[in-house]
Amino acid sequence: MNTIQKIMNILMNPNAELINVISIPCTLIEIIIYVNMCLVLLNIKTDRKHKYLCILTVSIFSCINRFFITSPFNVILNILIIIFMYLIFFKVKLLEATVGIGIPFILTALFEMISSQIYTLIFNKPYAEFASYPLYSIIFLLIVYTCLFIMLQFFKHFKVNITLLTNLNKKDSLSILNTVILGFITIFLQLYITAFYNNILPHAIILLSIACLIAYFFVSIFNILKTKQLEIANRDIKNLQLYNNTLKIMYDNIRAFKHDFHNIMNGIGRICNS
């Protein structure tokens, strides 16, 4: 009983050193989710060796950056390192590597904002005041990583990948572009509100902010899935048209061959009779 009480005292009191220790396995978990989400979204086929080497290398650099480089410069450097490792281990293009880290990073920022808003709503204090408490940090990270894992399984189940969003018509491209721009604006505004006004906002505004973030997230996913379905249907229609055109050409060729064959046989018959 005393041991449990001592553990709870350690977890319930500010402890920067313990949080740094906890950040090491959490960084590994985050990188594992990021790499797997990149492989799913970019539809990359790779072996386990390159996958695990990428995870290990990025995790080591991320931990080093966390301890020796201040925020937000360590985050920027981590993103650049991840892009570079994707280029080396997965042999993708620069744009694909950027998208491969950009989408998981945006999702992480979105889930962190929602979780911090929930913390503010429950405890009536901004999450920044709890960031130095190990227990609250663990719960916060578990919520964020659980949401990321659910999104990873969602992408796998519905086979959502960037290759299905290529060669879109102008209308669909503009729709996705507007969604992405709106997403960046929303995330920027929410980061600003979270950083400066969370401690003075009424609960109704916080609830509305959470509802808007969740609504935007699901509407965006719905639009992407609909775009994917329309693209697949459009490809099927084009393939069917090509198939019908091929059948028509084959039918015309067979008719021409039949006509020529009939003329040849008639000619042979006349020669034999004469």
Image (cartoon, rainbow, N blue to C red):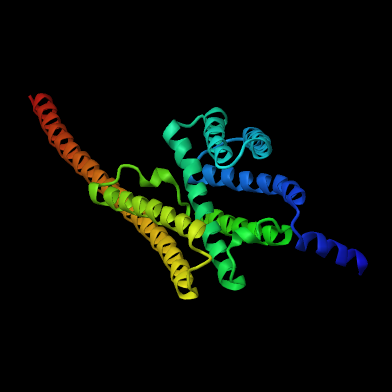
Left or right of 60? Residue 186 is left
Q: Residue furthest front?
A: 200
Left or right of 92? Residue 266 is left
Q: Residue at x 37, y 53 (%)?
A: 185
Q: Residue at x 36, y 46 (%)?
A: 165
- Residue 13 locus on image (x, y percent): 76, 61
Q: Quadrant of residue 247?
A: top left
Judge by depth and name the residue closer to the eye, 217 or 76: 76
Q: Quadrant of residue 140?
A: bottom right
- Residue 224 locus on image (x, y percent): 38, 55
- Residue 130 locus on image (x, y percent): 66, 61
Marks counted in the figure total 0
Left or right of 109? Residue 60 is right
Say if 117 sits above or below 168 in the image: below
Judge by depth and name the residue closer to the eye, 12 or 111: 12
- Which image quarter holds the C terminus? top left
Can the viewer see residue 42?
Answer: no
Q: Residue furthest bottom?
A: 204
- Which image quarter holds the N terminus? bottom right
Judge by depth and name the residue closer to the eye, 24 or 240: 24
Can the viewer see residue 93?
Answer: yes
Judge by depth and name the residue closer to the eye, 269 or 49: 49
Q: Residue at x 29, y 48 (%)?
A: 173
Say if 51 sits above or below 40 in the image: above
- Residue 208 locus on image (x, y percent): 43, 71
Left or right of 6? Residue 238 is left
Q: Residue at x 63, y 60 (%)?
A: 129
Q: Residue furthest right?
A: 2
